Amino acid sequence: MGRGKCSAILVSLGFTLLVCSASVVAAETHVVGDSKGWGFSMSYDSWSSGKTFAAGDTLVFNYQGGVHNVVAVSESEYRSCKVRSASDMVATSCCTAKFELKKGVNYFICGVPGHCAAGMKIRVVAN
């Protein structure tokens, strides 16, 4: 094979690798509520609207320990604001919880009685 053909093949292979690697996107980390964190301070539907989430991204919940918590729940638990069992809850001690998003709809609530009903819940769709 001549030099010209080898060079053309290498350039073609390099271009293919470049295109393929550009389509691989690193997972992102999203801090729920940004600097306000997870509490009564905002509408989490408003916070999540306009943001793009992907499977593998991480949601970080920063909250006041001993006052709030965060629980990954089913759709029915999200709607009813009731958690199946206390064993599903994340410790309320302190102060950060991280969840990796699964493809599809992901639901989270504060499991402290009354907090979810007061707005501490979020629904995130990961592509």
Image (tube, rainbow, N blue to C red):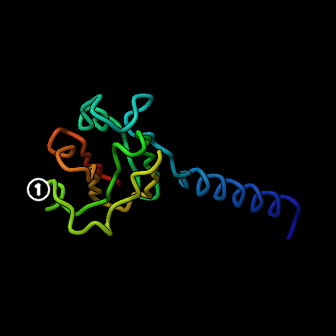
Rendering coords of residue 45 (x, y %): 23, 37
Query: Mark 1 sits on what residue?
Result: 80
Residue at the spot x=44%, y=58% of the render? 100
Where's the N terminus, which quadrant? Answer: bottom right
Mark 1 residue type: Ser
Residue at the spot x=32%, y=57% of the render? 71
In the image, residue 11 sits, relative to residue 51, either above or below, namely: below
The image shows a total of numbered marks equal to: 1
Where's the C terminus, which quadrant? Answer: bottom left
Q: Nearer the viewer, residue 58 or 36?
A: 36
Rendering coords of residue 113 (x, y %): 19, 50
In the image, residue 121 sits, relative to residue 41, either above or below, namely: below
Horizontal relation, residue 90 to residue 45: left or right: right
Rendering coords of residue 18 (x, y %): 65, 52
User: Which picture quadrant has residue 5?
Assistant: bottom right
Rendering coords of residue 119 (x, y %): 19, 39
Q: Nearer the viewer, residue 95 or 21?
A: 95
Q: Nearer the viewer, residue 13 or 75?
A: 75
